[in-house]
Amino acid sequence: MALELRPNCECCDRDLPPDSTTAVICSFECTFCAECATQVLKGACPNCGGELVRRPIRPASKLANNPPSTKRVLKAEGCAAA
């Protein structure tokens, strides 16, 4: 099963395309931008408490058969409550 490669930061809704070098994820694939992850979340996922690490970049040649998710996930209360 491939990573979903979610299209946005769950906190600020910033676009995070599949080749983004600023996307971070937890082990449950919650997805955030590096800025929210470091400045607001202090490196911990607000959903599960897990570590946030850089999301790998899927090779462009693999995107056709393994496309990124188009479903945007956004925390209704934002990151401030994290």
Image (cartoon, rainbow, N blue to C red):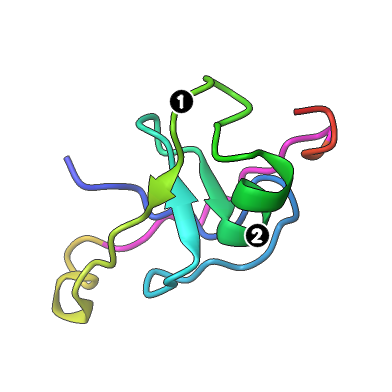
Q: Position of residue 31 (x, y in %)?
A: 51, 46
* Count of residue discs: 2
Image quadrant for the C terminus? top right
Residue range in magenta is 67-77
Mark 2, Cα crowd under 10 Å, few <14 / some 14-19 / many 20+, is some
The label on residue 50 is: 1
Q: Is residue 48 magenta?
A: no
Determine whether, in the image, residue 62 is placed left or right of residue 55.
left
Residue situated in front as seen by the camera: 18 or 24:
24
Task: Give the CA distance from mark 2 to mark 1.
Answer: 17 Å
Q: Quadrant of the N terminus?
A: top left
Find numbered disc 2 in the image and state the secondary structure of the residue it sits on: helix
Residue 35 disc label: 2
Residue 5, disc: none
What is the three-letter code of the residue carrying label 1? Gly
Judge whether residue 71 is colored magenta: yes
Q: Position of residue 39 (x, y in %)?
A: 71, 51
Q: Which residue lies at the image location 57% right of the left edge and 50% below the top edge?
A: 32
* Residue type of the residue flagged with mark 2: Glu
Please state which of residues 22 and 15 is positioned toward the viewer in this rendering: 22
Left or right of 37 in this view: 40: right
Q: Earlier in the sequence, mark 2 or mark 1?
A: 2
Magenta stretch, main secondary structure, is loop
Judged from this view, the residue extending furthest toward the top is: 48
The local secondary structure at tag 1 comes to loop
Q: Nearer the viewer, residue 25 or 38?
A: 38
Query: In the rendering, at what x and y percent does residue 47 appear?
Result: 59, 24
Residue 21 lies, with reference to residue 71, above or below; the image says below
Name the residue: 53% across, 21% down: 49
Please tell me which residue is depicted at 59% across the width and 58% down the height of the picture.
33
Image position of 63 with respect to 13: above or below? below
